Image: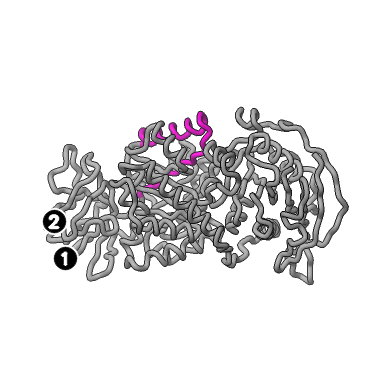
Amino acid sequence: MALRVVRVDVGWCGLDVSGFDHKGVRGNGRCTVKFGRKRAGAGARLVPAVRCSSVVRTEEKSVGADVTRLERAVVERGFEVDTRVEGELKEGGFRSVRRTKLVATIGPSCCTYEQLEALASSGVNVARLNMCHGTHEWHREVIKNCRRLNAEKGYGIAVMIDTEGSEIHMGDLGGASSAKAEDGEEWCFTVRKFSGPLPAYTLPVNYEGFAEDVKAGDELVVDGGMVRFEVLEKVGPDVKCKCTDPGILLPCANLTVWRDGHMAREKSATLPTISSKDWVDIDFGILEGVDFIAVSFVKSSEVIKHLKSYVAARSPDRSIGVIAKIEDADSLRCLDDIIRVSDGVMVARGDLGAQMPLEQVPSVQEAIVDACRKLNKPVIVASQLLESMIEYPTPTRAEVADVSNAVRQKADALMLSGESAMGLHPQKAIEVLRGVSLRMEHWSREEGHSETTSLPEISKSETGRTSEQICNSAAQIANKLGADAIFVYTRRGYMASLLSRNRPDCPIFAFTESSHEMRRMDLQWGVVPFQFAFRKDLESNLLQSVSLLKANGMVKPGNLVVAVSDVSSSSQSAGILQSIQVHVVS
């Protein structure tokens, strides 16, 4: 297959790509933008080098060459991708791929192999296990089912465990899935342990010092305001309360104490972020090979650093992403520091709403999403997205608007909690998220809502700055040309994350040799992970991947692809820098 290769000049400020407009390229064209370093005194900055070269011709290598070290499926086809995504690509092409990722909390409503398959086929990217509920045996079975789905059906579901944290929670409701508190009813909150059934109107609390912290007249707020109680009196380990705002009580619901219009922070404020139970759960997650660990009520960056060091020591051959949950005022005070050291962030709006005025939550959400984008960390918007679908088969219009707003903010992922874990319609809830996401993404592209967010430079090393500027420029080129996709060849996913940070109009196809990194990238906006055996250089990788995808009906003649890579060959010298290639499939 003959190729036309042209190197063109580009301006650094205000990238000029008019010389290779999509419509002006004929056949299987490729444009290469080389990057070099221009030094002025002691400083240095990245600028596109000015070079022109003659047309070069090359022959496409045979499919299947140099395929080693990968699973059998990859050896047979040369690549692997989520089976649902493959179907979407074959049916609708590159731009039909959803950019916003979906996280589903797994519970009694969706824990069997068949139920998980239904969620996967509807668009779930990450399965979340809430360690507040269930036994390790139950969670192990869910993880086993997810891995089995990936192996047998070709899905790419990643697994996340979410720790309980040391904040005050209600305990289990004696095996009941919920309880109803009516206005004026008297209930007892207690730290006592019960070997048998719970007495009527009794709610266990996980914090031993609970009775010491509260006072008569305090307000107890359950699950961010789902139910409210007034403290009447304390009797030993028991706290007698009257329901003032009726509602549904759920197992392990968050519990906050308010006094004189402010949240009371007594001894509970000194509780460790990671409890002894959490460490046991973290060890379980490491042993089971999960992809992400979410940490509740993170108060400082030191907590994340400590956990990442612990995980690295316990799992030296396999990195596990650590997700910081932003749930209280302590997290917000050192937000940027927490984001920088984390592998991702979750906006836990339910608990945030319990610890600040409700009207502040939307602006705080937007600020967190924006900060994560600028610092190049994936962000998950969670809590009460489709709360009504726990009971009803359709959401409220307000819920749809809420989901749409998160998609317009270009959050990396949306998460369902009770809607999927214990709701009556888990698959329908996922389908609603998927449908709203697709529609809002399409509308944004149709209306030409181009990205205007100013992205600060985040890399400290020269190599990092080079990769960062190449990815910024590749995204600009892809948008200017109306490219169908950006192909990135990456070992650790870093360049894929840099491209995702730019939120380009087209999807990002990230090729990696590691099935683990493939699942890790499934949390990043716009990234479609592929498992693929690398060749010696970008040119060979591009030729082979296009050929394989075309042979499997996932690429069509005329598709325009922008390609970058952080995979270098041993033969390359230190002075050879990366390039951006523009390729049209013939």
Q: Quadrant of the C terminus?
A: top right
Q: Circle 2 is placed at which residue position?
A: 240
Kindly identify which numbered label has been placed on residue 217: 1
For badge 2, the amino acid type reads: Lys
50 to the left or right of 126:
right
Sequence-wise first label, 1 or 2:
1
Q: Alpha-carbon neighbours of circle 1 within 10 Å: few (<14), some, or many (≥20)?
A: some
Please tell me the numbered disc located at residue 412. none
**Image quadrant where residue 209 sits:** bottom left
Q: Does the magenta stretch include residue 472?
A: no
Can residue 242 be seen here? The reply is yes
44 or 439, which is in the foreground?
Answer: 439
For numbered disc 2, what is the local secondary structure? strand
Residue 212 is left or right of residue 448, and the answer is: left
Q: Is residue 522 above or below residue 381?
A: above
Residue at 71% over, 31% down: 64
Identify the residue at the far right of this view: 54
Task: Report the span colored magenta.
Answer: 136-164
Does 556 sit above or below residue 303? above
Which residue appears at 58% of the width and 67% of the height?
452
